[in-house]
């Protein structure tokens, strides 16, 4: 632990602004002097006590609940004081200032400040201390932030599942199996007289196969969790007047974008967060793709292409009412060529044929692999929603998903690669046991990164800096 982790900290733990209740949280070693100064008495551990909070002149700042959680039975693993007051910004700032003032007061016995190094907490520092004091592992700490930021009910439930340790348990189960396999290989290296027959008798190949199968299940659940956490960016693209803004409004169920018969109405992006089966989608409506007629529209088209190139999926909207017009077909072909040229190969493009309500019969040959819809009547929208989930890789997992981050998925992919190398070594006629052992060691390191058993300080700083202050 760094020196700053030993300093007592204080922060407002509730969201900024006015509210019915606001919480100030203090954490550190032996904070009894702060408790005595503000509360005027000792507190029964883990019992809410209603009393006045007093300033240095013993004047009442506010009245509320004070709760003392002695170490190690607290959120951070240190002594924790929570002051629950009325949720006015000024009141809470006064309480923070009073905590700092009480810590800096002179101890009459030592003639030194009671807690000279108490300071304002940095973002995520309370949760960081919980991790450093072994109250939670790193995956659980990240799940706390993900629960706070969850944008759908499904995402919140998945984050709660990870926060309770379900993801960590799956990772630790993999670690136990991997360590056992490593022991067999290392024993063979340490005792050369025990040749490859030793590994065969111990069913090393079978153990590795079962390990890979378990990893595949964990990877599937974690990948789905990463989709839940990050959401899917879907960009609607196409010619002017194809119905892009109407489609955004239909998917969102609200009149968000202006819709007119005038080509070029949309000049800038319009974004809305929606959900499909609990999966968050960031849907972006863009300017019509054409040779711009004025400078403002030109900027809108440039921004449209910027959004398209960063999309997880693109809805290429066509107009069924104009599908026989030669000029329209030529422009659609030009846009299709630009999409193929500018988009990463992995980005799916869904052809969507709009305005099916304006034609007597939808020409399925025209639609090809696309989906015919009517943004006006809602026809085909449900099929489009399910197609979106399909192309981005969302699959409902019967046993539920973990809330996971990109770093977790990347770590699991690296483990998968190392285990594949190990399997190839075991299948060889003359296995290189030292390379096999190294593959298994690297796999263990990558797994341990997920829960934080082997993690750099730089990564910890990056993770916890994204938390809110007071958490």
Image (cartoon, rainbow, N blue to C red):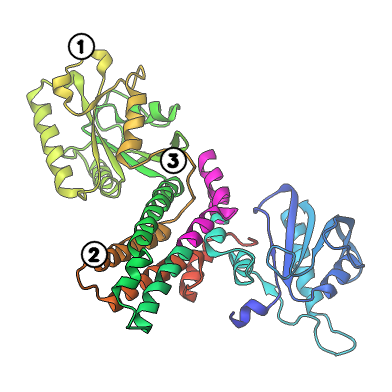
Q: Which mark is residue 397?
A: 3
Q: Which residue is mark 1?
A: 361
Q: Which residues are magenta?
A: 145-174
Q: Secondary structure at mark 2?
A: helix
Instruction: Say what secondary structure mark 3 lies in.
Output: loop
Confirm whether the magenta stretch covers residue 152: yes
Q: Is residue 464 visible?
A: yes
Residue 38 image label: none
Q: Is residue 136 above or below residue 248?
A: below
Would you say the residues marked 3 and 2 are in contact, meaning their CB atoms lie under 8 Å apart?
no
Circle 3: is it few (<14), some (14-19), or many (20+) Cα within 10 Å?
few
Residue sitting at x 44%, y 40%: 397
Of the numbered discs 3 and 1, the one sitting upstream in the chain is 1
Q: Are marks 3 and 1 in contact (CB under 8 Å)?
A: no
Using residue 229 as the reference point, say whether residue 347 is left or right of it. Answer: left
Nearer the camera: disc 3 or disc 1: 3
Give the number of callouts: 3
Vertical relation: 114 (above or below) 202:
below
* Quarter of the figure with residue 286: top left
Q: Is residue 288 magenta?
A: no
Q: Position of residue 277 (x, y in %)?
A: 45, 33
Residue 427 circle label: 2
Q: Position of residue 60 (x, y in %)?
A: 89, 61
Spatial CA distance of label 3 from label 1 is: 38 Å
Between discs 1 and 2, the one toward the N terminus: 1
């Amino acid at each position: 632990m760094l020196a700053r982790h030993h300093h007592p900290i204080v922060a407002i733990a509730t969201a900024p602004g006015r509210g019915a209740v606001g919480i100030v949280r203090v954490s550190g070693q032996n904070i009894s002097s702060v408790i005595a100064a503000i509360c005027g008495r000792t507190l029964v551990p883990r019992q809410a006590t209603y009393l006045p909070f007093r300033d240095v002149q013993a004047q009442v700042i506010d009245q509320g609940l004070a709760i003392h959680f002695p170490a190690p039975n607290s959120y951070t693993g240190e002594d924790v004081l929570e002051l629950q007051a009325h949720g006015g910004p000024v009141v809470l700032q006064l309480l923070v200032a009073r905590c700092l003032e009480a810590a800096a007061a002179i101890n009459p016995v030592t003639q030194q400040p009671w807690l000279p190094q108490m300071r304002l907490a940095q973002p995520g520092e309370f949760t960081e201390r919980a991790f450093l004091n072994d109250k939670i592992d790193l995956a659980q700490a990240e799940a706390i932030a993900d629960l706070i930021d969850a944008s759908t009910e499904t995402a919140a439930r998945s984050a709660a599942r990870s926060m309770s340790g379900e993801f960590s348990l799956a990772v630790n189960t993999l670690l136990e199996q991997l360590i056992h396999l490593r022991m067999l290989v290392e024993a063979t290296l340490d005792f050369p007289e025990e040749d490859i027959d030793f590994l065969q008798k111990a069913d090393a190949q079978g153990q590795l196969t079962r390990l890979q199968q378990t990893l595949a299940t964990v990877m599937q659940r974690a990948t789905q969790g990463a989709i839940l956490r990050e959401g899917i960016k879907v960009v609607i693209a196409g010619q002017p007047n194809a119905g892009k803004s109407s489609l955004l409004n239909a998917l969102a169920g609200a009149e968000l974008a202006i819709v007119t018969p005038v080509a070029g109405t949309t000049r800038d992006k319009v974004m809305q967060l929606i959900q499909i089966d609990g999966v968050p989608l960031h849907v972006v409506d863009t300017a019509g793709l054409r040779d711009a007629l004025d400078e403002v529209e030109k900027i809108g088209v440039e921004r449209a292409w910027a959004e398209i190139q960063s999309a997880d999926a693109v809805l290429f909207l066509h107009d069924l009412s104009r599908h026989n017009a030669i000029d329209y077909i030529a422009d659609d072909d030009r846009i299709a060529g630009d999409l193929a040229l500018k988009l990463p190969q992995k980005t799916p493009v869904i052809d969507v044929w709009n305005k099916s309500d304006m034609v007597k019969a939808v020409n399925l040959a025209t639609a090809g692999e696309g989906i015919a819809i009517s943004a006006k009547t809602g026809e085909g929208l449900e099929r489009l929603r399910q197609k979106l989930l399909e192309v981005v890789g969302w699959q409902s997992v019967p046993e539920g998903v973990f809330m996971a981050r990109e770093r977790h998925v990347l770590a699991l992919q690296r483990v998968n690669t190392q285990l594949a190398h190990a399997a190839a070594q075991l299948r060889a006629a003359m296995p290189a046991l030292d390379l096999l052992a190294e593959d298994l060691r690297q796999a263990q390191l990558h797994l341990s990164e997920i829960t934080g058993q082997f993690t750099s300080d730089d990564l910890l700083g990056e993770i916890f800096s994204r938390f809110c202050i007071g958490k």
